């Protein structure tokens, strides 16, 4: 599973846009891209603009206006770690005053998942004009990742809940900082976000309702979640939502991913970057003793954050450990995975 972190801190920009174009730099209307070479910079610039349109249409039903200043995007190609960070400075208006983005990892993974994930953060930041609750910001952005990554988060959420590592929703919703167990926030945030969006009708309709719920929950200093859940989804309480959400997770996750090859012409920059292959992905199976297989929290690829005093006092696992689905069925035999496909011009 890949972790990505978005920081809502008022930090000065780390990059100064030079007056002349560098050999490894490519400029678009909304991005200034720095990459290992000019070809990759151009590829990521075009994909960034494409995802900027797509994600805004998916979440808002309209494109975002041109940003007052291009967003610096630094691309680092690595093979042993994957991640990214988008930093925002918000004004008092409210609104986004400045933003910057850095992503690192294998090129194909960056194009398939990391870049659309980070672009989604910019859409949510533009919509709210302020820092978005961590669970919704990350959970909503995971929705932009490829089929395999989303399924991985779905499976992880069940595993964490079974292991007693879940965070009660009444604690998760108002959380302003990343908890030490950040991977749980990603998986649980994605699962809860996907559940509410589908409950609201799916697609743009479901996301519009979800955004309205988040906006209502952010009222009263970010502590209006009980009233928000009652008015937008007709649950009796956040605990009622939690019970029904958990009940929906008791059946094993099933997903079928598109197994098509890249439609880019062979030898084109995008095809070379994505990699034209038809190899399937192996699904994780259960360990021999029948218990869900857990991976340790990933800390190397993200900057850890210590919860504030208020959040720390509330960080208790869901008691007792939740038994969601039989362990032997953690992975359904019906799951079929193929190579992730970057949507082209949806």
Image (cartoon, rainbow, N blue to C red):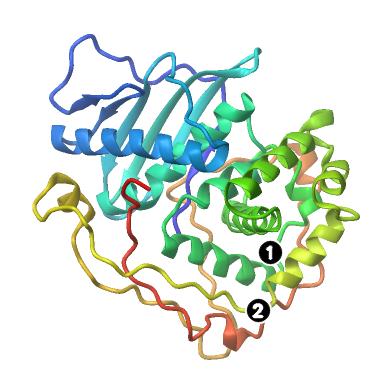
Residue 88 image offset from top left, x and y in percent = 52, 25
- Residue in view at x 68 percent, y 68 percent: 161
- SS category of the residue bearing label 2: loop
Q: Residues within 10 Å of mark 1 (few under 14, many from 20)?
A: some
Q: Quadrant of residue 36?
A: top left
Residue 134 image offset from top left, x and y in percent = 64, 41
Residue 318 appearing in the image: yes
Q: Earlier in the sequence, mark 1 or mark 2?
A: 1
Which residue is most to the right?
236
- Residue in view at x 67 percent, y 59 percent: 195
Residue 48 image offset from top left, x and y in percent = 34, 36
Q: Does 51 appear above or below 250?
A: above
Q: Where residue 251 is drawn, which disc sits there?
A: 2
Q: Does 341 appear above or below 256?
A: above
User: For mark 1, what is the residue?
Assistant: 165
Q: Residues within 10 Å of mark 2 (few under 14, many from 20)?
A: some
Q: Where residue 330 is drawn, which disc sits there?
A: none
Q: As drawn, is 339 to the left or to the right of 304? A: left
- Residue in view at x 57 percent, y 25 percent: 9
- Residue in view at x 49 percent, y 56 percent: 298
- SS category of the residue bearing label 1: loop
Q: As drawn, is 101 to the left or to the right of 259? A: right
Residue 276 image offset from top left, x and y in percent = 18, 61
Measured in 3D between alpha carbons, the distance from the residue under mark 1 to the one under mark 2, in whole angstroms, is: 19 Å
Q: Does 260 appear above or below 174?
A: below
Q: As drawn, is 291 to the left or to the right of 287? A: right
């Amino acid at each position: 599973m890949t972790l990505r972190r978005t920081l809502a801190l008022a930090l000065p920009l780390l990059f100064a846009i030079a007056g002349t174009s560098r050999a490894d730099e490519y400029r678009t209307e909304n991005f200034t891209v720095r990459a290992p070479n000019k070809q990759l910079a151009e590829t990521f610039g075009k994909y960034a603009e494409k995802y900027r349109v797509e994600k805004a249409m998916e979440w808002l039903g309209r494109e975002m206006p041109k940003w007052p200043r291009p967003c610096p995007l630094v691309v680092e190609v690595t093979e042993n770690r994957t991640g990214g960070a988008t930093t925002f400075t918000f004004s008092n208006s409210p609104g986004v005053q400045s933003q910057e983005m850095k992503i690192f990892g294998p090129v194909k993974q960056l194009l398939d998942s990391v870049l659309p994930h980070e672009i989604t953060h910019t859409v949510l930041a533009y919509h709210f004009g302020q820092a978005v609750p961590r669970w919704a910001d990350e959970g909503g952005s995971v929705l932009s990742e490829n089929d395999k990554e989303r399924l991985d988060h779905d499976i992880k959420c069940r595993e964490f809940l079974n292991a007693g590592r879940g965070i009660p929703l009444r604690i998760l919703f108002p959380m302003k900082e990343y908890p030490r167990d950040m991977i749980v926030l990603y998986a649980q945030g994605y699962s809860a976000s996907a559940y509410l969006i589908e409950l609201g009708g799916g697609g743009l309709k479901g996301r519009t309702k979800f955004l309205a719920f988040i906006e209502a929950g952010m009222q009263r200093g970010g502590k209006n979640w009980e009233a928000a859940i009652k008015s937008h989804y007709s649950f009796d309480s956040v605990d009622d939502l939690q019970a029904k959400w958990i009940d929906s997770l008791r059946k094993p996750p099933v997903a079928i991913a598109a197994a098509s090859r890249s439609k880019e012409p062979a030898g084109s920059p995008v095809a070379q970057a994505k990699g034209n292959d038809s190899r399937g992905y192996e699904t994780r199976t259960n360990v021999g003793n029948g218990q869900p297989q857990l991976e340790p929290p990933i800390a190397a690829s993200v900057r850890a954050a210590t919860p504030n005093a208020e959040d720390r006092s509330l960080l208790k696992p869901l008691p007792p450990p939740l038994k969601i689905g039989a362990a032997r069925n953690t992975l359904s035999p019906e799951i079929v995975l193929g190579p992730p496909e970057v949507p082209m011009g949806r």
